[in-house]
Structures are given as structure tokens and as C-alpha cells.
Amino acid sequence: MMEDKGVKKLLLKLTLLALPFLLWPVLEAAVLPGNLFTFRVWETLSVNSMRVMSGPFYPNMYVKMEEEGELAPHTPFAEKRVVEWYTDPYGYRNRDTKTDVLLIGDSNITGAKLSQEETLAEVLERQLGKDVYSFAPATVNRFLGTRRFEENPPEVVVVSSIERRIAELPAVGATGMGAKLRDMTGTAINSSKVLTWLAVTADRISKLALYRRTLAQIDRTFGKKEYIAYQNEFFLEGEPANRDFSEEELKRIADVLEGYKHALESRGIRFVFMPIPNKENIYHQLLPSRKKPDFLPRLMAELKQRQVDVVDTQSTFENLYHNENIPLYPVDDAHWNEKAVEAAAGILAQYLQHDDSEHTRDARQLVKNQE
């Protein structure tokens, strides 16, 4: 009998000891502001474990906060900047869901360390006079497997990628049941405020934001660096970013992009590819080797030979940085800044306006011929 009482007391003490650790994530998710322990809106709104939601971010959100760059947050090197984010009902970074031109891409297209009005989608929309939708981060396969785009396809799809990720772009393939199921469940969750709140709260609990921030601070305290610095600029990869690509690698990448063109044209949609140069590419003179990479010019030449529409941002970026001394990337971040976005949007708008009606007519005719 005495032993039973001792066990019960021990269990009670252990429960009381564990209670704060069990309740804290719930308090953090349900009561405290979502950005209290994060350094960027990206970490605040991104979906962590609840992959049943349709998009990469929590839907129907607005956040305004002071951000720091991804390469040296919470250090003396961080450059702070106030940004605003809006997400649409599908969990993508847009104010609405209208889509004449659709952008598929990575975090640069999403607009990491940019305020909403500075994102490529919004700048291009102002310059083009058409509704531009940011479907990022996402892939062409995700686009092809999303029902709402089958029912209401855009006129043009622009696929964009930072240079270092181009080799990882997936070839056109089966969408898979997982993606289709996520599209269905995401639509159901987004249609209910209660289900959305439950999904977002559960996901925020899984993030353990304070715990992760504490670990990161411990790492920095003991000298773990998360950045590469050359001449007071911070880089994500440094020298390896400017590696050489073989002819075989180049043709494989071109095959993937040509596959995008065929898949989209079969739906009557014009395809355009817009690569974004690495920070290490445009700032190559700051690196120890001072080596200028030739990957993008070679890839663009190959794509033009295959009659794949490709937008050249490299030449413009080189001119802006080397001849006009205009910085195109934040000091503490590898993503492009608002000046680079403005320049890229101008080039892209001109490209899309050129022979736009002819491209659209040819694509629509191709679909009719297949029917």
C-alpha cells in the first residue's frame, strides 16, 4: 500500500515537472504572436508538418515584421528590414487569385526578404497590366496536378529558378496520388475557417519555435557559422556556386526545360523560362578565384537553339552591378533585392508583350489540332 502511494507521488511530481514543457507549445501556437521567435516571415507562415494544406504557407494571412537576412540572423552582420506579407486562400503569397500570367519558382519568386509590393508578381503586374499570380515555391509538376489551373489555365507560365537550383528542376512526370490528395484535402481545409484554424495551430505546435531558436543561439555562441563572407558580402555557397557544367549536364537540363514547353503548349499555355543568376555569379570578382561562370550563357544558347523562350537577366544584372554600381542582393542574404526584381520584371514584361498574341494563337491552335 505504501509502495502504491510512493509511486503515485512520483508520477504526480513527474507530471508537474513535465507540464510546462507539454503546455508551452500549445501556448506558443494558440496565444503568442506567430513571429515572436522567428527572424523572417517565411519561418512564421511556412507549413512545417501539416502537409494536408494546399500551399507552402498558412492561408489568408497578413504579417508585418522586421526581418533579417538568412545568412547571418541574430548576429552583428544582420541587416534589418520591415516587410509585409499577404497569403491567399490557397496558401501562396498573393493578395488575390486572379491569374493571366503565372510564375512558378523558388523562394526568389516568393519574395524572401522583400515586402509584398516588391515581389516579382506585383512589380510585373504593374508593368504588364495583367493579373500575375505567384505559385511559389512550387514545381511544374505541382502546377500540372492542380485542379484549379486545369479548370482556369493561365495564358502564360513563367518558370524561374535561381542558378544553383536549375540542375535540380524535375522533369515532367506523373503528379502522384500524394500531390492530388493534398490538393483535395487542402481545398476542403481552406473552405472551413475552423479546419484552417485547427490545421494552422497544429502546425505551429509542431514547429517548437522557441526550442529551435534556443538551439540556434547555442550554436552561434559556440562559434558555429552559417555564412560565407568575402569582402563584407555574405554568400550561401561561395566558390562551389560557380562550378563548371559539362556538355552532357547542360543538355540534360535543356531536355527538362524543353519538356516543360511541350507539356504546357499541349494545354494551350505559353512557356517562358527565366533563370536568376547566383549572387556568386554577379559578384564573382569578390570571390577568391574571381572566376566568372559560363553556365547561364551556355544554357540560354542551347535553349534558344531548341526554340524555348528564355529571358536573359544575366546581361542586365552584370551591367547594373559592374557599370552602374547598383547592388542587386542584400549584404546578408542570397536572394535578389527589390532593384534586381524591378530590372527583371522590366525585361520579362517586354519579352511577354513581344509577339504575345502570336504565341497565344499558335498554342491555342495546337490544342485544337490535338482534339
Image (spheres, rainbow, N blue to C red):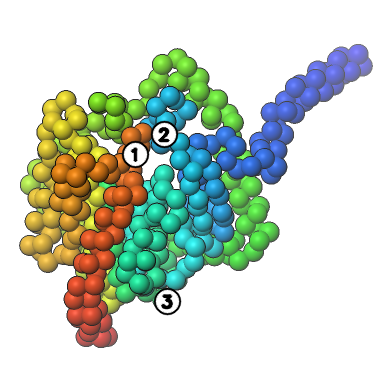
**Amino acid tagged 3:** Glu
Is there a contact, CB below 8 Å, between mark 2 and mark 1?
yes
Identify the disc placed on residue 79.
2
In the rendered image of this protein, does residue 325 appear above or below residue 20? below
Between 227 and 317, the one nearer to me in the picture:
317
Identify the disc placed on residue 330.
1
Marks 1/3: CA–CA distance = 39 Å
Q: Which residue is mark 3?
A: 151
- Residue at point 28%, 73% (across, down): 269
Give the x, y percent position of residue 177: 43, 60
Marks 2/1: CA–CA distance = 8 Å
Q: Quadrant of residue 160?
A: bottom left
* Mark 3, other Cα within 10 Å: few <14 / some 14–19 / many ≥20: few
- Residue depth check, mark 1 versus mark 3: number of the one nearer the observer: 1
Marks 3/2: CA–CA distance = 43 Å
Callout 1 secondary element:
loop
Residue 26 in view of the camera: no
Image quarter in which the C terminus is found: bottom left
**Amino acid tagged 1:** Pro
Reading the chain from its start, which is encountered first: label 3 or label 2? 2
* Mark 1, other Cα within 10 Å: few <14 / some 14–19 / many ≥20: some
Between 195 and 238, the one nearer to me in the picture:
238
Give the x, y percent position of residue 231: 25, 26
Reading the chain from its start, which is encountered first: label 1 or label 3? 3
In the rendered image of this protein, does residue 173 appear above or below residue 11? below
Image quarter in which the N terminus is found: top right
- Residue at point 60%, 37% (across, down): 36
**Amino acid tagged 2:** Glu
Callout 2 secondary element:
loop
- Residue at point 64%, 64% (across, down): 192
Is there a contact, CB below 8 Å, between mark 1 and mark 3?
no
